[in-house]
């Protein structure tokens, strides 16, 4: 299939491009390098330098013999959107092109409005472009498990059947996010659902949990093809951060009581989930929702696992409970359904000791590049 990946430069975008290309699809990537610019602006950066998209596409061509086309531009700019869609004519659009950081969205008014404009503007332009240039295309949109928040009831897979005063109907599962970034993902879902109803779009909305890892089948640990790997407070996510902190000898930064529980997945499973969603598309007029994670952990459990990983590898790892800069429940019920992707054939790669050890060994190669000053800044929610 002809697949256009929006946000092809990001942590997941480029690995997805190589994965789909390796599986025989005709892939193009779009990015305006927003993530790189935001990192520079905040004086943070990935653990190791990442070649730009043209360079990565060249490296991938040498390795696989496959072409990945590169479009550099802003999906908020309609002229760019129109020319990209007319030139490439996608059958599938994978939409990762969002400001992905909760702390960044909570820094100040400017970062909040950038998050709103970028995330909602790109989603709206994607919808309009599909309607105008690729009406039968399938939109595969990255949402987040954070859309649901942490309600005191079981979380269903996207939808809930309600009975009220003797009558029944089906609704999107209630959503109440914990950051502005996560809130824009709720708004994306609402936009998509509206246009699914009025224009009969074909959409899969993937409620993804925090992703970890570096190694994919396509990069096989090869340095120049590794993903953009952030470990700073703004753009790094908890498992990747804890591994880097362990290597740096920095006490693991558990926020508050550490009972915050989320659904996690290996980067390899993100790629498989995206491919399975593409190869088994949603119907026209369907908003299909999958909860995309493979296992749940609390922050305390993750910290202990990383501490044990340190001891196996001869590194003493300390854990430090910090005052939580975020506003979130630190002890809560969490039981989300996640059967849809397993039914499509997902075979999970769990967070085993081997996976943790492999991550730690990879990060050890870059120990000298770790900047302790970016690990914790304490971006406060209020
Ligand atoms: N946490 C710590 N210490 C840290 C970093 C995080 O205790 O040093 C805690 C946070 O307070 C939170 C949990 O770990 O309770 C997860 O935080 P995170 O920074 O790994 O993830 P989050 O901000 O929720 O966002 C990340 C991605 C986002 C994606 C989301 C999925 O940045 O793009 O949507 O994971 S989910 O968490 O399910 O909403």
Image: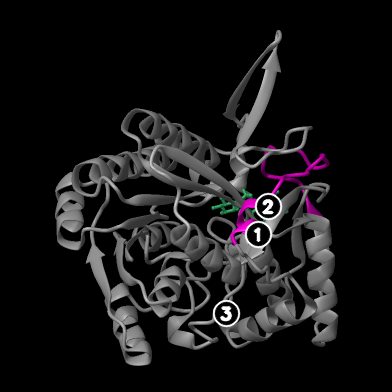
Report which residue position mark 3 lands on: 215
Residue 75 placement (x, y as % from top left): 27, 50
Can residue 305 be seen in the rendering of this structure? Answer: yes
Residue 156 placement (x, y as % from top left): 68, 39
Q: Main secondary structure of the magenta part?
A: loop
Instruction: Identify the magenta region.
Output: 321-344
Report which residue position mark 2 lands on: 339
Question: Does the beta carbon of the residue at mark 1 sit less than 8 Å from ligand 1?
Answer: no
Q: Are marks 2 and 3 in contact (CB under 8 Å)?
A: no
Quadrant containing the C terminus is top right
Which of 172 and 254 lies nearest the eye of the viewer? 172
In the image, what residue occupies the spot 70% across and 18% down?
163
Residue 79 placement (x, y as % from top left): 14, 48
Quadrant containing the N terminus is bottom left
Which of 25 and 284 lies nearest the eye of the viewer? 284
Q: Are marks 1 and 2 in contact (CB under 8 Å)?
A: yes
Q: Is residue 119 above or below residue 345?
A: above
Q: Is residue 283 above or below residue 310?
A: above
In the image, what residue occupies the spot 75% across and 82% down?
354
Helix or strand or loop: what does disc 1 sit on? helix
Q: Is residue 120 above or below residue 368?
A: above
Q: Which mark is residue 342?
A: 1
In the image, what residue occupies the spot 68% across and 44% down?
325
Q: Residues within 10 Å of mark 3 (few under 14, many from 20)?
A: many
Which of 61 and 92 lies nearest the eye of the viewer? 92
Q: Is residue 335 magenta?
A: yes
Q: Is residue 376 magenta?
A: no
The image quadrant that residue 173 belongs to is top right
Helix or strand or loop: what does disc 3 sit on? loop
């Amino acid at each position: 299939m002809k697949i256009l990946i929006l946000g092809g430069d990001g942590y997941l975008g480029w690995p997805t491009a190589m994965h789909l290309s390796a599986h025989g699809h005709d892939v193009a990537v779009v990015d305006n390098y927003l993530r790189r610019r935001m990192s520079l602006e905040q004086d943070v950066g990935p653990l190791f330098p990442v070649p730009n998209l043209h360079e990565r596409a060249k490296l991938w061509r040498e390795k696989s013999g496959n072409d990945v086309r590169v479009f550099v531009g802003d999906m908020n700019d309609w002229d760019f959107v129109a020319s990209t869609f007319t030139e490439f004519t996608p059958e599938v659009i994978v939409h990762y092109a969002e400001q992905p950081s909760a702390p960044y969205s909570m820094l100040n008014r400017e970062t909040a409005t950038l998050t709103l404009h970028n995330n909602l503007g790109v989603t709206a332009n994607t919808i309009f472009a599909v309607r105008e240039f690729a009406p039968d295309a399938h939109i595969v949109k990255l949402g987040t498990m954070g859309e649901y928040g942490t309600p005191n009831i079981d979380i269903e897979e996207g939808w809930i059947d309600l009975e009220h005063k003797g009558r029944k109907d089906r609704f999107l599962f209630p959503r109440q996010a914990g950051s502005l970034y996560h809130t824009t993902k709720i708004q994306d879902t609402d936009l998509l659902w509206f246009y699914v109803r009025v224009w009969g779009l074909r959409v899969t909305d993937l409620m993804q949990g925090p992703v970890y890892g570096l190694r994919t089948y396509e990069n096989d640990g090869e340095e120049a093809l590794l993903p953009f790997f952030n470990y700073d407070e703004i753009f790094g996510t908890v498992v990747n951060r804890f591994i880097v902190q362990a290597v740096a000898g920095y006490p693991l930064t558990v926020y508050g009581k550490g009972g915050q529980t989320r659904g996690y997945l290996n980067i390899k499973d993100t790629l498989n989930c995206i491919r399975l969603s593409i190869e088994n598309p949603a119907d026209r007029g369907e908003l299909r929702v999958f909860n995309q994670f493979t296992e749940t952990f609390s922050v305390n459990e993750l910290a202990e696992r990383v501490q044990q990983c340190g001891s196996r590898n001869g590194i003493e790892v300390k854990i430090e409970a910090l005052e939580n800069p975020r506003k979130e429940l630190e002890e809560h019920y969490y039981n989300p359904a996640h059967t849809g992707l397993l039914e499509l054939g997902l075979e999970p790669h769990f967070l085993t000791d081997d996976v943790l050890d492999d991550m730690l060994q990879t990060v050890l190669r870059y120990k000298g590049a770790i900047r302790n000053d970016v690990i914790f800044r304490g971006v406060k929610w209020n």
